[in-house]
């Protein structure tokens, strides 16, 4: 089998694996709050702190793990993270005390948070640049399909939540073993990456931290995730408190969101290819902004359904565009550290619901929706500024001059379209 065919097979395997682990996560971790409340008697505040701790630690750990993957290999790191997640999920299934369950849950959350950016970096390693949007888009679509199917499996399982954690752990274990056995195909930039000294983990992190473009991308991504990352956590209580039959309306909106993601993904990818990643990102932010204002003005299911379609179109534009923008400012030697550093934007998943809930309780829906609309506008500005900024000057001592020139030149070949 030639290298191109092997790389293509590996990409398909990663995409399928992404869908598989999404099903595993959705059918188990979606019901964490239920498990903590019914089995261990925790209150809402304790549950919120616990569910936020693991992902927050993961956001901090991801840059270091991503940089480490640049040195020791992405497949090794992915297998390790999948194995840790498998053990943690199985441990959650067997846990009899709240301490053991919480410790296992934090390990699982950190491992999952580290797995995501390294997996995206590996996709970039083995995909030709002209096909990266296509495969990133497929990966996003398959993952969303997994999140649509997984909760239904969990609901069907009923009270057997412990068994669901164990089954999910076994799925992760199977994926880890298959990934280890498949091995790593030759990357697109193999020759270039081998011809220069690989920077240390500290050097990689320092280089990523020095790049002002990445700083703006992280800032913009944080604001965007605050709006769409956990939108159900803020929209559900608003509908429940202000609309008759709000719970039913929210359930329908969930279905609309999932359907639009699956149906619109192909059209979104073609639009990104046509107008460019930056323009698609800005358009997505504008659509999300308009949808937040639309939610504020809506008073019926029809209005909310219409603006949920608009919101979801914005979401499926910004997610792959954001990956492309980050991919455009890194190279084979620092891709893990850049994607890892960018994953710090997942803190938006935590302060978004917290700030949204605060605004909803203090100022009502007006304050919440206007805040999120402002976040979407600010995100568009930050991505645009970041894209226009020049790359940092290479400062790594001992790096050959030719390599420094190559890094600078590669960084300037940005997707300005």
Image (cartoon, helix red, strand yellow):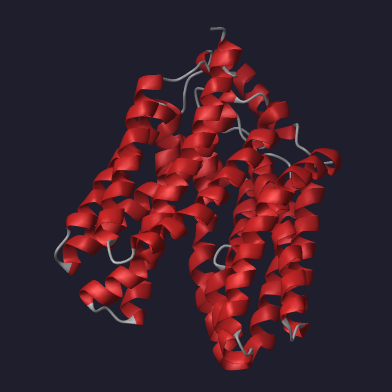
| Image x and y of residue 67, in percent | 44, 37
Task: Answer with the quarter of the image where residue 377 lies.
Answer: bottom right
- Locate the C terminus by quadrant: top right
**What residue occupies the far left of the structure in this picture?**
96
Q: As rendered, which of 189 and 170 lies closer to the eye? A: 170
| Image x and y of residue 46, in percent | 31, 77
Q: Is residue 156 left or right of residue 394?
A: left
Which residue shows up at 24% across the image and 45% down it?
Answer: 87
Q: Is residue 342 left or right of residue 154?
A: right
Res. 146 visible in picture: yes
Which residue shows up at 75% across the image and 61% down it?
Answer: 285
**What residue occupies the far top of the structure in this picture?**
1
Q: As rendered, which of 107 and 167 lies closer to the eye? A: 167
Number of labels in the image equals 0
**What residue occupies the far front of the structure in this picture?**
156
| Image x and y of residue 125, in percent | 56, 26
Res. 388 visible in picture: no
In this view, 147 is above or below 70: below
Q: Is residue 330 left or right of residue 56?
A: right
In this view, 21 is above or below 362: above
In this view, 206 is above or below 88: above
Q: As rendered, which of 98 and 200 lies closer to the eye? A: 98
Task: Answer with the quarter of the image where residue 237 lies.
Answer: bottom right
| Image x and y of residue 15, in percent | 54, 35
Which residue shows up at 36% across the image and 57% down it?
Answer: 28
Which residue shows up at 24% across the image and 79% down it?
Answer: 41
In this view, 175 is above or below 342: above
């Amino acid at each position: 089998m030639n290298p191109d065919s092997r790389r293509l097979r590996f990409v398909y395997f990663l995409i399928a694996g992404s869908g598989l682990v999404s099903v595993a996560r959705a059918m188990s971790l979606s019901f964490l709050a239920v498990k903590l409340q019914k089995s261990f008697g925790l209150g809402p505040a304790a549950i919120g702190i616990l569910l936020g701790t693991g992902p927050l630690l993961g956001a901090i750990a991801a840059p270091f793990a991503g940089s480490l993957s640049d040195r020791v290999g992405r497949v090794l790191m992915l297998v390790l993270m999948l194995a840790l997640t498998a053990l943690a999920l199985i441990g959650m299934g067997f846990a009899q005390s709240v301490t053991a369950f919480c410790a296992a849950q934090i390990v699982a959350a950190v491992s999952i948070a580290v797995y995501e950016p390294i997996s995206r970096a590996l996709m970039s390693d083995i995909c030709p640049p002209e096909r990266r949007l296509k495969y990133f888009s497929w990966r996003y679509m398959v993952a969303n399909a997994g999140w649509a199917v997984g909760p239904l499996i969990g609901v069907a399982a009923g009270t057997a939540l412990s068994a669901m954690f164990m089954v999910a752990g076994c799925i992760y274990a199977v994926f880890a073993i298959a990934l280890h056995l498949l091995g790593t195909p030759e990357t697109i930039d193999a020759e270039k990456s081998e011809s220069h000294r690989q920077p240390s983990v500290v050097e990689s992190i320092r280089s990523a931290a020095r790049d002002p473009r990445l700083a703006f991308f992280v800032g913009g991504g944080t604001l965007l995730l605050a709006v769409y990352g956990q939108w159900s956590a803020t929209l559900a209580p608003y509908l429940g408190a202000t609309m008759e039959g709000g719970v039913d309306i929210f359930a329908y909106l969930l279905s609309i969101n999932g359907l639009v993601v699956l149906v619109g993904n192909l059209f979104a990818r073609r639009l990104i290819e046509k107008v460019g990643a930056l323009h698609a990102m800005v358009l997505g932010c504008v659509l999300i902004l308009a949808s937040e204002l639309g939610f504020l003005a809506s008073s019926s299911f029809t209005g909310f359904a219409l603006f949920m379609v608009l919101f979801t179109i914005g979401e499926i534009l910004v997610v792959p565009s954001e990956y492309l923008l980050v991919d455009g400012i890194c190279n084979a030697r620092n891709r893990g550290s850049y994607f890892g550093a960018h994953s710090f934007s997942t803190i938006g998943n935590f302060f978004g619901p917290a700030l949204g809930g605060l605004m909803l309780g203090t100022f009502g829906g007006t304050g919440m929706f206007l805040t999120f609309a402002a976040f979407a506008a600010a995100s568009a500005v930050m991505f645009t500024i970041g894209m226009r900024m020049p790359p940092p000057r290479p400062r790594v001592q001992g790096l050959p001059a030719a390599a420094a020139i190559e890094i600078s030149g590669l960084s300037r070949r940005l997707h300005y379209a």
